[in-house]
């Protein structure tokens, strides 16, 4: 045996085997997280009974080791817009790996970023250029930087209850104190109430505002401003030489029944738009800051400034291929039309239940972004139980609904925000009538149990004890 042959055999013997590693160590998943990662995550999952072991996933479903299916109404916080392992996106990722492209040389211009930018801009007719990063918060950071630079002003306005990410810049425009506490000093930004034009104008008159960043539909609570508010806000901003930034990280790419959520209101044309999540196809992290030509030309004003804003992994071939495949699927499979039809079916069927259940206050949203809000019941018996939960911690009733949806009906959902009695549904955009039927039937069963004083309230007592213990 030659030296080269020996080295080759040795290399193969020590070859990394992912399947073998998972088979040998996969059962340690919760222990590994407890020891090496965020130790509170497994603790939380164990407490609420979400400590499942999912073996595989496809489309809108997971399966456990026993072959039980679970309906996903969360879509990885919106990342899995096309569901898991869409065959077109999966093939594109395989294809780009097999192509062995000369990727990320940093000193050439590969075709895939330009092709994906072209596709995105075709859905954004008033915008001209794209910067590709790696996440939603990075897309927001880019928009904040660009707005400050081109206006020469330091301050960004944001809305109460907003969520734009958790890195320092995006955290500065985060409307929830629970995320911000302990991380000061942050950037000099200011919150205004969602939909309050007078508050917006008062801040703009100070002359130091670069932009307003807004989610056309807020993820926390699934809240929107009143009709016409976004267009009026845009007009105010432009009158005061400030920009409008639309954060479409969760609402973009068809989630609300249009490609972007801001398109629901005529005449709204943001100066900068942030997208991410669903653009990844669930495979490769990607974010995009999309903007007007003059903004990009002012930021990148000379060859000396060619790298003034950049990202080491930005525009990588795998992310670009996944993004191109996602947009192709959206067009070829008429995803936006499906979202409109399925979203209306789901929302209307849930809204019809508000007269049936005292604690179901409102069903709202657009497309497949739906908020189910609970409120104080009228009957004395239910009021006393509601008061017990509220005294311990606001939001426990919503959690009390989420848990049996998973444990009894194998449906994964989430509470929309801390201290909120709202469940948010953001399922994969590919779901249809079968998934709507399954969710509505399960939700009805859980609400029946809650209003009849069944097993749901036993879990409620556990939540109360946990909430009190964590004070």
Image (cartoon, grey):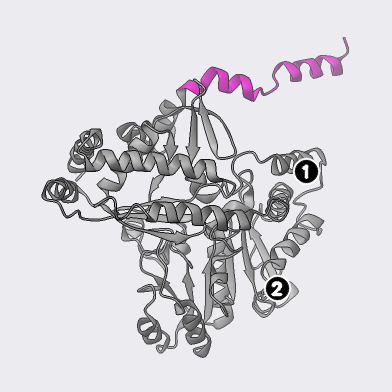
Percent position of residue 94, x then y: 75, 38
Q: Is residue 304 above or below residue 422?
A: below
- Left or right: 148 with respect to 309? left
Tag shown at residue 128:
2
Q: Is residue 458 above or below residue 389?
A: above
8 drawn magenta: yes
Percent position of residue 107, x then y: 79, 58
- The residue located at (46%, 64%) in the rendering is 217
Percent position of residue 418, x then y: 32, 53
SS at mark 2 in the image = loop
Q: Residue 111's quadrant in the figure?
A: bottom right
Region rendered in magenta = 1-27
- Quadrant containing the N terminus is top right
Can the viewer see residue 207 in this picture?
yes
User: Which secondary structure dominates the residues rendered in magenta?
Assistant: helix
Tag shown at residue 96:
1
SS at mark 1 in the image = helix
Circles 1, 2 touching at the beta carbon (< 8 Å): no
Percent position of residue 175, x then y: 37, 64
295 drawn magenta: no
Q: Please tell me how crowded label 2 is: few (under 14), some (14-19), or many (20+) other residues with Cα within 10 Å.
A: some
């Amino acid at each position: 045996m030659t030296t080269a042959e020996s080295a080759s055999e040795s290399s193969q013997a020590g070859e990394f085997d992912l399947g073998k590693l998972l088979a040998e160590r996969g059962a340690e998943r919760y222990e590994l997280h407890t020891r090496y990662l965020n130790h509170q995550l497994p603790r939380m999952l164990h407490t609420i009974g979400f400590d499942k072991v999912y073996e595989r996933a496809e489309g809108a479903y997971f399966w456990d080791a026993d072959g039980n299916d679970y309906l996903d109404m969360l879509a990885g916080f919106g990342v899995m817009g096309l569901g898991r392992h869409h065959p077109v996106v999966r093939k594109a990722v395989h294809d780009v790996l097999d192509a062995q492209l000369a990727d990320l040389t940093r000193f050439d211009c590969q075709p895939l970023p330009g092709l994906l930018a072209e596709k995105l801009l075709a859905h954004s007719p008033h915008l001209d250029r794209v910067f590709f990063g790696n996440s939603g918060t990075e897309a927001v950071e880019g928009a904040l930087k660009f707005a400050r630079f081109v206006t020469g002003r330091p301050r960004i306005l944001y809305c109460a209850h907003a969520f734009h990410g958790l890195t320092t810049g995006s955290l500065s425009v985060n409307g929830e104190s629970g995320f911000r506490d302990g991380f000061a000093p942050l950037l000099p930004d200011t919150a205004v109430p969602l939909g309050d034009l007078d508050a917006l104008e008062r801040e703009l008159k100070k002359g130091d505002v670069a932009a307003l960043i807004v989610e056309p539909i807020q993820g926390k609570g699934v809240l929107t401003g009143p009709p016409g508010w976004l267009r009026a806000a845009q007009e105010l901003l432009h009158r005061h030489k400030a920009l409008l930034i639309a954060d479409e990280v969760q609402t973009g790419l068809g989630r609300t029944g249009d490609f972007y959520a801001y398109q629901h209101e005529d005449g709204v044309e943001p100066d900068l738009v942030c997208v991410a999540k669903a653009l990844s196809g669930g495979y490769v992290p990607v974010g995009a800051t999309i903007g007007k030509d003059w903004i990009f030309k002012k930021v990148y004003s000379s060859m000396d400034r060619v790298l003034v804003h950049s990202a080491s992994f930005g525009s990588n071939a795998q992310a670009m291929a996944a993004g191109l495949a996602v947009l192709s699927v959206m067009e070829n499979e008429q995803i936006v039309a499906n979202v409109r039809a399925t979203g209306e079916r789901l929302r209307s069927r849930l809204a019809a239940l508000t007269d049936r259940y005292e604690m179901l206050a409102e069903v709202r949203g657009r497309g497949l972004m739906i908020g189910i809000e609970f409120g104080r019941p009228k009957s004395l018996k239910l009021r006393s139980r509601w008061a017990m939960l509220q005294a311990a911690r606001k939001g426990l009733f919503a959690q009390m609904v989420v848990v049996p949806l998973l444990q009894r009906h194998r449906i994964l959902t989430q509470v929309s925000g801390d201290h909120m009695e709202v469940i948010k549904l953001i399922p994969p955009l590919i779901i249809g009538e079968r998934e709507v039927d399954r969710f509505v039937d399960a939700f009805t069963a859980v609400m029946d149990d809650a209003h009849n004083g069944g097993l749901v309230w036993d879990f409620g007592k556990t939540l109360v004890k946990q909430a009190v213990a964590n004070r």
